Amino acid sequence: MIKENTEAISCYAACLQLKDSERIKEKFIKPIVERFFVARSISINNCKEIDSNSEISDKDFNKHGVDYFYEKIFDDIKKTKEGKIDFSVKYCITLDKTNCGKTCDKTGIRYDEILLNTQPVFYFIYISIEEIFSFLREESS
């Protein structure tokens, strides 16, 4: 039932393996993520999900520190012709409600964010395992 993921960098980030996971991501998770970013006035085209093996929790920040941000979050940082800093906003889907102390007023989606000054650079977006199984049950009816 619980399988070790030796490639994960955190022991606090769970990865759920299900049959038809691409269908679940496309039909269930993607619409939630899109709704969330629209509500936050962030273009989904400027957002990028980090690899599930790269997900970390609040408990990992002291261990991985600044290196993690440059390798995983600012991996596509660049300076525009106008001199502005440009990068995609990263996010991960988490099953750990502990990482998501905020609730989006417009959607009810639980989340948390990491800011660079006042600019969000990373989001934890919470989806409960119960919601995933409800979706699966509704899809099969």
Image (spheres, grey):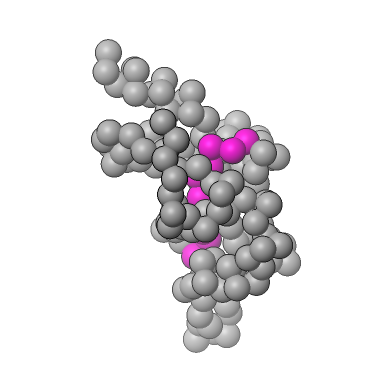
91 up-or-down from 20: above or below: below
The residues colored magenta run 88-97
Residue 90: in magenta span: yes
User: Residue 81 location, x and y as percent?
Assistant: 50, 86
User: Residue 130 location, x and y as percent?
Assistant: 49, 23
141 up-or-down from 1: above or below: above
30 lies left or right of 126? left
Choose between 118 and 65: the one closer to the eye: 65
User: Residue 39 location, x and y as percent?
Assistant: 56, 43
* Identity of the residue drawn at 73% across and 67% down: 117
Choose between 77 and 67: the one closer to the eye: 67
Quadrant of the rendered image containing residue 48:
bottom left
Q: Quadrant of the N terminus?
A: top left
- The reply to whether residue 40 is visible in this rendering is no
125 up-or-down from 10: above or below: above
43 up-or-down from 74: above or below: above
User: Residue 11 location, x and y as percent?
Assistant: 56, 49
- The reply to whether residue 55 is visible in this rendering is yes
97 lies left or right of 129? right
Choose between 38 and 32: the one closer to the eye: 32
* Identity of the residue drawn at 51% across and 76% down: 77
Quadrant of the rendered image containing residue 68:
bottom right
* Identity of the residue drawn at 55% across and 53% down: 10
Q: Quadrant of the C terminus?
A: top left
Residue 46: in magenta span: no
Name of the residue lying farthest toward the top: 141
* Identity of the residue drawn at 53% across and 37% down: 95
Predominant SS along the magenta part: strand
Choose between 28 and 51: the one closer to the eye: 51
